[in-house]
Image (tube, helix red, strand yellow):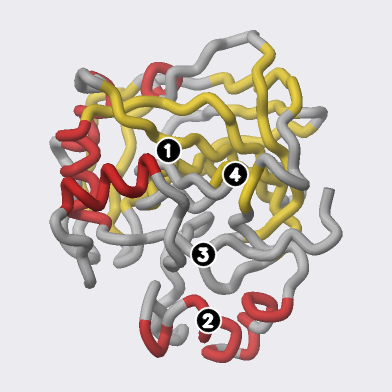
Amino acid sequence: MRRCVPLLLALVSFASSPRQVRAQSHAQPQAQSHAPHWTYEGAEGPRAWGRLDATWKVCGTGHEQSPIDLGGSVAPHKARIDERFSATPFVLFHNGHTIQAAIERPSELTVEGGHFSAAQFHFHHPSEHTVGGKAYPAELHLVHKNDRGELAVLGIFIEFASQDNPVFEALISRLPEAAGDSVHLTTPVDLAALIEDHAGESEEIFSYHGSLTTPPCSEGVKWTVRSRPMHASFRQLQRLVAVLGESARPVQPVFDRR
């Protein structure tokens, strides 16, 4: 997998300048072994996803695809995100495209009238969503599902901080490094502390209807992206990037979405 070199310069660039055209995202586990192989660049990269499998056609033809650039036609608004977390053990799994954490204890999300249960979270580098053309060093996607099987994803940008995030360190120190590897974190992790949740407070969010950001790019996903980022030190982000590589699908056209 291609790496930006030097890594330090690349991270600083992603944090301070408009995002360069790249490829990827993840709102679901890796495709099954019998599905076509896909990547974030080259002949099997994002431009080709819609042609790799007939069931992935919407990747190239859909009008509600994710990620998108926020802050223009999708303006922020005040809302209350009610995330009820249980400190939970989980399994970190390297699925070949991202590091995914399967949540073992119930966590619930209520946002703008919808109620969902958390299933997993995963990371992208750089951030998949941009704000006014700016990408953050990384983005966390917390994936939820309701009783009807509908998906809601809470996106949280990750920004540089001068000090380590102690909760994030529990993950960073145990990351599986190769595709197919997994690590079981038996000590419960406080998800609210991880994402710097401010329980009960209204905050500025971006919300829109979009899609999964990896094949099959299914639409009908309710996206909520928090304008306030969580934080991690340069060392921690450097460690995450060393394992992830580049894993962000390019931003997609908004079309007539509001």
What type is the residue that disc 2 sits on? Arg
Q: Position of residue 203 (x, y in %)?
A: 65, 18
Q: Which mark is residue 103?
A: 1
**Which residue is depicted at the point 49% across and 76% down?**
46
What type is the residue that disc 3 sits on? Pro
Residue indicated by mark 3? 250
Label 4 environment density (alpha carbons within 10 Å; few <14, some 14–19, many ≥20):
few
**Which residue is depicted at the point 14% across and 56% down?**
6
Q: Nearer the viewer, mark 3 or mark 1?
A: 3
Q: Residue furthest front?
A: 17
Residue indicated by mark 4? 132
Do tag 2 and tag 3 residues touch (Cβ < 8 Å)?
no
**Left or right: 249 in relation to 174:** right
What type is the residue that disc 4 sits on? Gly
**Left or right: 180 in relation to 146:** left
Of callouts 3 and 4, the N-terminal one: 4
Separation of residues labelled 1 and 2 (CA atoms) = 32 Å
Label 3 environment density (alpha carbons within 10 Å; few <14, some 14–19, many ≥20):
many
Q: Position of residue 192 (x, y in %)?
A: 45, 19
Of callouts 2 and 4, the N-terminal one: 2
Do tag 3 and tag 4 residues touch (Cβ < 8 Å)?
no
